[in-house]
Amino acid sequence: MSDEIRRNMALFPIGIVMKLTDLTARQIRYYEQHELIVPARTAGNQRLFSLNDVERLLEIKSLIEKGVNIAGIKQVLLPIEKNSDDATVINEQTEVARKELTDSDLHKYLKRQLRTKRPGQVSLIQGELSRFYNK
């Protein structure tokens, strides 16, 4: 499975995303309402977020802390449409892969993502996520 598919795989419920980003559920839903993130939905309508969603939320948080308002954030980070390549997806392939991931596999993958910086992207480590992982 390619890295991009993994990064868009719906993995995290909103409670975990709140801990990873230090944002409230209300803030996260607000950014979703403004189409700055598009988490996937399960059959039970639960939001599931990808690594890309977490990174984008950290970028939004950083911009807010710098005093940029929602209109400015929309200028910097274009809104995401539900059917775009950047939207978090749940399809047959990703759902099977998600169910096969053990906690230890997910832990290893997240740790690797913390150490990897992609060109033009905010590193997860900049979002202070390293404090959640043992060395």
Image (cartoon, helix red, strand yellow):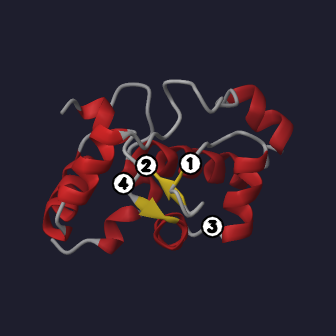
Q: CA distance from mark 4 to mark 3?
A: 16 Å
Q: Which residue is label 2 attached to? A: 50
- In this rendering, the answer to whether 98 lies above or below 88 is below
Q: Residue at x 41, y 50 (%)?
A: 10
Sequence-wise, which precedes: disc 4 or disc 3?
3
Query: Which badge, 1 or 2, comes first in the chain's sequence?
Result: 1
The quarter of the image holding the C terminus is bottom left
User: Mark 3 = which residue?
Assistant: 23
Q: Is residue 105 left or right of residue 97?
A: left
Answer left or right for 4 relative to 71.
left
Residue 104 placement: quadrant: bottom left
Residue 66 seen from this side: no
Disc on res. 39? 1
Sequence order check, earlier mark of 2 and 4: 2
Type of amino acid under label 4? Ile
Residue 32 visible from this viewpoint: yes
Mark 1 or 3: in front is 1
Tag in front: 4 or 3 = 3
Above or below, 124 relative to 92? below
Which of the two residues, 103 or 66, is positioned nearer the viewer here? Answer: 103
- Residue holding disc 4: 125
Residues at marks 2 and 4 touching, judged by CB atoms closer than 8 Å = no
Helix, strand or loop under label 1: loop
